[in-house]
Image (cartoon, rainbow, N blue to C red):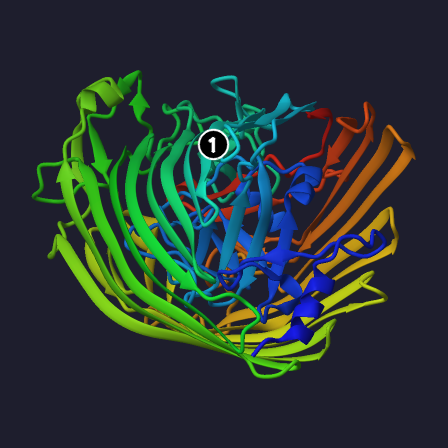
Amino acid sequence: MLRTGKADATAAENRNTEHSGLESVVVTAQRRTENSQSVPISIQHIDGKTLANAGYTALTDLQYLAPGVQYDPTQGAAFQIRGVGSESFDFSNAKSVSVVVDDVVMDAQRANGMIGMVDINNVDIMMGPQGTLFGMNSTSGVISVTTGKPVLNRLTTRVSASYGEHNERILNTTLNIPLGDRAAFRISGFDNAQDGFGRNVILNKLVGSTNEYGVRGKFYVEPTDNLDITLQGDYAHHWDSSVRTPVGGQTAAVTSELNSLGIYPNAKNADTADPIYGNIVSQEYGAALKIHAKLGENDLNFISAWRGSTYDNNTPVDLVPLNVYAYYPYNYGQLSTQKFSDEIRFSSPRGKFMEWLAGGFFNRLDARQTQYQWGTAGSPLYVNGQPAQTLYNNEGAVGQSGNTSLFQSRNESLAAFGQLKFNISHHFDIAISGRYTHDRNSQGLSFINSDVQAITGYSPTLTPTHDAPVYPWGQVSGQNFSGRISPEYHFNPNVMAYFTFSTGYKPAGIAFVGNVYDPYRKETVKSYEVGMKSEWMHHRLRFNMDVFREDFTDFQATVLTPVPAGNGTTILTSAIGNAGGLVSQGVEGNVAFRPIRDLTLSGSVSFTDAHFTDYRPKPTVDYTGTRLTNAPVWAANAFIDYHRDLTPHLGLQAHLDYAYRGTVWTVTGQPDYSRVPAYSLVNLRVSLLPLNKRLQVGLYVRNMFNQYFSTGYQLYGTAGYLHYTSPDARRTIGGFINFSY
């Protein structure tokens, strides 16, 4: 049964000839190319132009552009959607928000699969459980990134350079090279850096500086009209000195010493006097093979990928010279991951009475982490010039010869998935999808020796603060069937309403916190979403909204748990466990309006109530009713884009964006010290486009009103309250130049 009415409507939606109307938004939320307005999912779409105009350079900056999206750098370094996400440093824990770059799931711990945002076509953020059709479990949502594809028979290049305050420099380039009529090669590279705004007054170095660089290449070939193959590879490197700085709660002696050095701990302090310079160095790299074939009217897609990453974390916590106070001056971790995945999808064409999609997925992720943490737990390291002969070893175990923890984990997932969509009439459709998943997660803890003399410069005795784990290794296997049903009703070609019920799942795992063998249960979710998508005024006005509720059972939550740190003190360590339940519910809406051809106004807003409905990690602790970490109730964005042709060869372009994020707490239970007040960010970009608009020259202002904010607070034993700062929490003014050919 052909659906000519719907096909005509789709054709109308995809038109781009009527310049006064809004451009259509094409997404692949259901693993096939569709207009976003006809997909029964709440989607936030950010194109490459919006990313460039906002001036952000990292994938994590999406939190400033998409309401309902947050990024937590403190507890596992992962995304959250609708307030819900993975917040654990445990290696067996799967991410709640799955980042997918060019159809490859980026699931490595501490890695997002993309460091520099160069040559980005678009980013689609799909809200709510998406595990039925996307690679991994995705109980909270999917961030799907599509990068530039090689173009046949066209030689093109784009070069962009900008320089601003704080020695900010952003360089990127993309080159597309045709190789005959049926092949092309595309390569892009970037180099971004900026100086920090904090100071290490002892070492006379900046705190919070960053430097990133990388390259991505794609080779594309069409051997026949029904077959195309893409081979791609990428490498990226990141360095930063964004260490924790004191905000309060230090001992009188430490506070006095900080004050004498010109440092006054407070909510905006970015300075430290730690005599050991902390930094984080990470690398991400990989290769993928993608094969697409037309088999009659049907499409076959196969993606095979290999990825690796490293994450070296050198984060001493001492705050002042070591002859005054020391906590853990020798605190270093080294993580490496290797990942293999294969995915196959077979799908029917659109427009039939029944559309179908079927596929399979395999993923294996191996992680290896070493960590040593040696210190005095509060006593000076040097007394009268002599170093302490005994240090507490927070990463060793009583009765074990090793002084360094070695964690090794393997997460395996095997799944089959599919979807049937019935186009019952011109007005009514219904899609049913399902996924069967078998997971096996394992982790072990052992101990090795690091060279103490080489690290400390002398040979102290290391005293372990923990007992050895009773079980040094564990494995958990499990199965799950998740599903989704999505009826949708089209009132006319431009207005549709939908209801979606979906379920999701994350596998169980084994954690080792304080050397304690700690299994945790699988996490499940039931999600309900009712929405409307519409276009009005001859496609000049687009208005979408939805109401949602997500009920989680055995949510894999994280709390700060005190473990022995030596000298009778404790240190708070992130421990993962199961909360009996939580709910995330709210309303989302977005609007776009083009009143005249040269001007586009758009914005999004989200109201999210995300709180625990049952969480009692200890008999004396009850977090029921408290909000999830890094989950603002209100978040909003607004964009103004203006483009005017002054002459046939000269253009004017202006962009203004605004982001609001409400108050959040960065530690479970909403302790006062972890409260981050609400803040707003405004970015401006104005440019001229001479030389037949191949050249663009302009000025930018990021964080125009110099709005300060912190990214996270922690209570770190006797070291007091610490926090992380962001280079985005200050005004930056600069200029840029782009050239394209």
Residue sitting at the far right? 647
In the image shown, does 321 or 168 lie closer to the viewer? 168
List x then y, in percent, for residue 450. Answer: 18, 29
Q: Residue at x 47, y 37 (%)?
A: 244
Q: Quadrant of residue 131?
A: bottom left
Determine which residue is flagged by label 1.
216
Q: In the figure, is residue 567 to the left or right of 638?
A: left
Crowd class of label 1 (few under 14; some 14 to 19; many from 20; radius 10 Å): many
In the image shown, does 600 or 667 lie closer to the viewer? 600
In the image shown, does 567 or 21 lie closer to the viewer? 21
Q: In the figure, is residue 250 to the left or right of 402?
A: right
The answer to whether residue 157 is visible is yes
Q: Is residue 194 above or below residue 638?
A: above
The C terminus: image quadrant: top right
Q: Residue at x 30, y 36 (%)?
A: 333
Q: Residue at x 61, y 31 (%)?
A: 154
List x then y, in percent, for residue 402. Answer: 12, 36
